Image (cartoon, grey):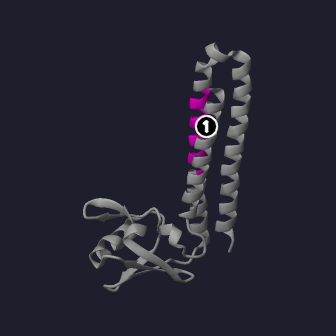
Amino acid sequence: MIADVLAEATEKMTKAVDVAKEDFATVRTGRANPQLFQKILVEYYGTPTPLAQLASLQNPEARTIVITPYDKSALKDIEKAIVAFPNLGASPNNDGEIIRVTMPELTEDRRKEYVKIVKQKAEDCKVAIRNIRRKAKDDLDALKSEVGDDEVARAEKELEAITKRATDAADEAFKKKEAELLEV
């Protein structure tokens, strides 16, 4: 039972770190990357649909992404979603067939702004990890009557170690992304 609680906590914390890393990938560095557009949802026939399901994304140049919709009637909706997406700062050009998105040069201020965004995402990840720890601790406390105080105390120490590994992984991912963003 204790092993199940710890395994579930480990799995959830790992997923939280993975989600944070995916979020970090959506914050751009010096190069345009199709991953920046993964979180964009396009209103397609009344349903929010991920852009990757509506179009192919290519990266022909360092600061340009070419979006080719599978359905040409979705061009305007895709363009609208790109403009509305926060923190992208991109300017889409629609020629009736494809959308060319040119990313602006990264200024020092813009880089610092991106670092703040990534830092917030890292903090959100750590909050999620702490919430998972709290839930696991509550589950362990509920098991005290069945397995005894010593077993629960050992499991809580193990839980703290798991939590530390997860928060360290989140910090490490943040530092890596920060260095990537500040690199000129």
Give how far across and how far down residue 65 sits, in percent: 48, 79
145 vs 141, nearest the viewer: 145
Name the residue at 62% across, 24% down: 140
- Quadrant of residue 12 in the image? top right
Give the position of the C terminus as an image quadrant.
Answer: bottom right
Q: Up-down: is 162 above or below 105?
A: above
Q: Is residue 81 left or right of residue 125?
A: left
151 vs 57, nearest the viewer: 151
74 vs 152, nearest the viewer: 152
- Quadrant of residue 166 in the image? top right
Q: How many residues crowd around disc 1 within 10 Å: few (fewer than 14), some, or many (20 or more)? A: many
Residue that label 1 marks:
9
Q: Up-down: is 172 above or below 137?
A: below
Name the residue at 47% across, 71% down: 89
Amino acid, disc 1? Ala
Name the residue at 45% across, 62% down: 39
Q: Up-down: is 33 above or below 97?
A: above
Magenta part of the protein: which range?
Answer: 122-138
Q: Up-down: is 138 above or below 63?
A: above
Give the position of the N terminus as an image quadrant.
Answer: top right
Residue closest to the far top: 145
Give how far across and how far down residue 134 sits, in percent: 59, 30
Element under disc 1: helix
Give how far across and how far down residue 17 sits, in percent: 61, 50
Q: Is residue 43 magenta?
A: no
